[in-house]
Image (cartoon, helix red, strand yellow):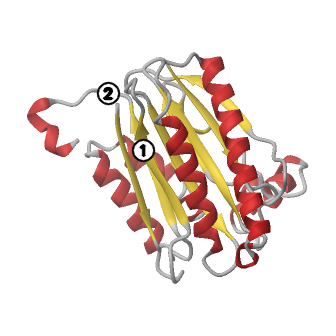
Amino acid sequence: MLAIFKTDKGKVRPHNEDNGGIFINGQGEMLAIVADGMGGHKAGEVASGIAVNELKGHWQEVDTSLSPAEAEQWLQDHVTEVNKKIFDHSKENLQCEGMGTTIVTAICTDRFATVANVGDSRCYVMNDQGYNQLTEDHSFVNELVKTGQISPEDAVHHPRKNIVLKAAGTQEEVEIDIKTITFEEGDKIMLCSDGLSDKVSKAEMEEILKASLAKEEKAERLIVLANQYGGEDNISLALIEYGTCDESRCNEC
């Protein structure tokens, strides 16, 4: 599998509260994470940092291949633990009161991908069924769409689209969405913060991901486009492509 994580401060925010990465355990299996922190002065980056560091540390301790059911349980257990650590930290440190973070994370193997999410950071999947959003936003505007009060088209420009209804660390307990899909040769998975998904359309993402480009260039083009459209938020993405590297072009992979 080929993978890359990129993050950018954007054009407006004074600092980057996003965090994430691609992490490999002893079995050569991959954990990808994107976390979009929120809170007071720099508290958002504390929350997203705790999330990524905790998940990374636990993942690097995994020394056996997981089944889909085991991967789902692993994410349930460790995202729950992350939620408690962030919540406790915010209670013990007044400058971090109320902080939290979205989390979208994927365990990727050569058989399946298991994805967990809390908040409005997203996972998209490109496979033989097309390019589709796998996760559901835990947001105020998505609830309006689900209940038929506004259309998906209205949601794109809704003034309250950035209100998140669920995030890791803001409550003592959190509900986590977890899904497992088949991951096969040629498939692609992209995790991203709303700094990308709020600015770049699904069709534009698909066009870039389908292009005959190295994964680094695909990631860079997506970030450049989000900044061209305003870049009001931090922009982060993790791109995972199921494929093997052509040794004659390995510098491009």
Name the residue rendered at 71%, 79% in the picture.
95
Task: Report if residue 202 is visible in the image.
Answer: no
Tell whether label 1 touches label 2 (CB within 8 Å): no
Task: Report if residue 85 is visible in the image.
Answer: yes
**Left of 126 or right of it: where is 167?**
right
Residue tagged by mark 1? 22
Q: Secondary structure at mark 1?
A: strand
On the image, the x and y values in percent for residue 169 come to 75, 57
Q: Nearer the viewer, mark 2 or mark 1?
A: 1
On the image, the x and y values in percent for residue 78 come to 66, 39
Residue tagged by mark 2? 243
Spatial CA distance of label 2 from label 1 is 16 Å
- Which one is nearer the viewer's eye here, 217 or 93? 93
Q: Which tag, 2 or 1, sits closer to the chain's start? A: 1
Q: Is residue 32 above or below residue 108?
A: below
Q: Secondary structure at mark 2?
A: loop
On the image, the x and y values in percent for residue 238 come to 45, 48
- Please, what is the three-letter code of the amino acid marked with disc 2? Gly
Where is the C terminus found, in terms of image quarters? top left
Q: Is residue 66 above or below residue 43?
A: above
